[in-house]
Image: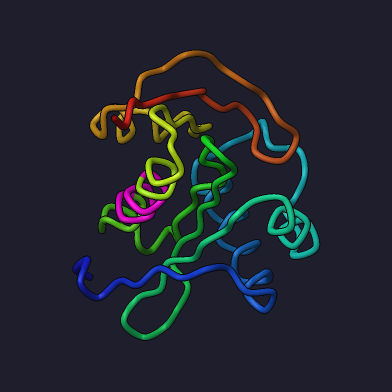
Amino acid sequence: MSLRDLSIRKFRTEDARTVAKIINNSLLDANNNDANEEVTPKFVLTLSNKRKMYVALNDDGKIVGTASIDFDTIYSVFVDVHFHNQGVEEAMLKLLEEIAANNGFGLIKLEAGINDKKLYEKLDYNTVGELSTNEFGQCILMEKYLL
């Protein structure tokens, strides 16, 4: 899949089940034993009411990734395991970085899974700490200057 075959749009209520499945499969694929709870569609809907959520779609209209932003912080970047290493995560991050910059933020923060740290470092993010959550397990706190 090339990036020109990818589109990103705002999350819709009917996306909750697919997004929850992508998140859960991503956590299992990462062997993230720190995640104690399964992410449910109801939980995804709760998050969508707190943050601006987006989904990435392939050329068939299938949701292949999700990410969200709240002010200067990116959350819940997950890509369908069958679409890893195809630029989906990078495309979503670029959009969210543009949103933050357009809203006057010069620094963007995110919580990265341990297996994603190298990718984010390639995209100029720096590690600033660690965090553990029930939903997503152990996370690396990272940030990037935008301006």
Quarter of the view holding residue 22: bottom right
Quarter of the view holding residue 124: top left
- Residue 94: x and y in percent read 32, 49
Q: How many marks?
A: 0
Quarter of the view holding residue 87: bottom left
Left or right of residue 51: residue 83 = left
Residue 109 or residue 35, whichever sits in front: 109
Q: Quadrant of the C terminus?
A: top left
43 lies above or below 101: below
- Is residue 61 magenta-colored? no
Tell me the residue at 57%/48% (across/down): 28
Q: Quadrant of the N terminus?
A: bottom left
- Residue 59: x and y in percent read 31, 82
123 lies above or below 6: above
Tell me the residue at 52%/13% (across/down): 129
Tell me the residue at 33%/33% (across/down): 120
Left or right of residue 135: residue 93 = left
Tell me the residue at 59%/43% (across/down): 70
Magenta segment: 90-97
- Residue 43: x and y in percent read 77, 56
Q: How is the image coloured?
A: rainbow
Magenta segment's dominant SS is helix
The single residue placed furthest to the top in the displayed view is 129
